[in-house]
Image (tube, rainbow, N blue to C red):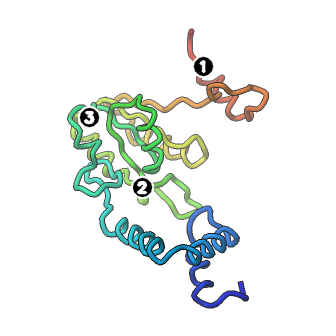
Amino acid sequence: MKAYAQPIKKLIEELGKLPGIGEKTATRLANYILRATADDVKKLAESIIEVKRKIKFCSVCLNLTETETCHICHDKNRDHTIICVVQEPDAMVAIEESGCFHGTYHVLHGALAPLDGIGPESLHLNELMKRIDSKTVKEIIIATNPDVHGEATALLIIRMLKGRNIKVTRIATGVPLGGDLKYIDKMTISKSLEFRRGM
């Protein structure tokens, strides 16, 4: 990076802070920005500033929204007695795009990762408990990722809800449709057998 002028180095450093962007990708992006028209670069900069200025958390589910409550929480046709708990907004988007869920969501904005300094207080669990305490919720679907952090988060939520008169379910994990068993990892096969269902 020594060969680059200081403003380019700074841009590469800033782009490199984005998740999943290493130095090579950051350099490619910086070079793309340098070749782009002034108008395109201005639009990119303005869209980044606009997102930071306009987007906030929904007051109910903590989804990202421009308004006080997001379009899902505002929708009277949704089943507000069911809450699907997800780690991040992109997981919620994936479930929404499937078109098969018509309840509401609660976005934690993370998962338990004590080594990274993410404990229960870093997640939006208090807001979830307030929603449950409203007595209108009948079921919580835990849709955290099926990895170590997601499983730990799911277990914590299950413990927090113990003794309450509320149905708690966990999304199924296992072999994907169209998958070939010989290419599936051991953990996925193990979970598939553990959560098998009757035919």
Residue matched to label 2: 123
Q: CA distance from mark 1 to mark 2?
A: 31 Å
Work out whether residue 11 can be spotted: yes
Work out whether residue 16 can be spotted: no
Amino acid identity at mark 2: Leu
Side of 2 where 168 appears, left or right: left
Relative image position of residue 190 (x, y in whole percent)? 69, 29
Q: CA distance from mark 3 to mark 1?
A: 29 Å
Q: Which numbered circle lies on residue 80?
A: 3
Q: Quadrant of residue 101?
A: top left
Q: Secondary structure at mark 1?
A: loop
Relative image position of residue 39 (x, y in whole percent)? 44, 74
Q: Secondary structure at mark 2?
A: loop
Q: Secondary structure at mark 3?
A: loop
| Mark 1 vs 2: CB contact within 8 A | no
Amino acid identity at mark 3: His
From the viewer's perspective, is residue 131 above or below residue 137?
Answer: below
Side of 13 where 153 appears, left or right: left
Q: Nearer the viewer, mark 3 or mark 1?
A: 3
Residue matched to label 1: 196
Relative image position of residue 26 (x, y in whole percent)? 63, 71
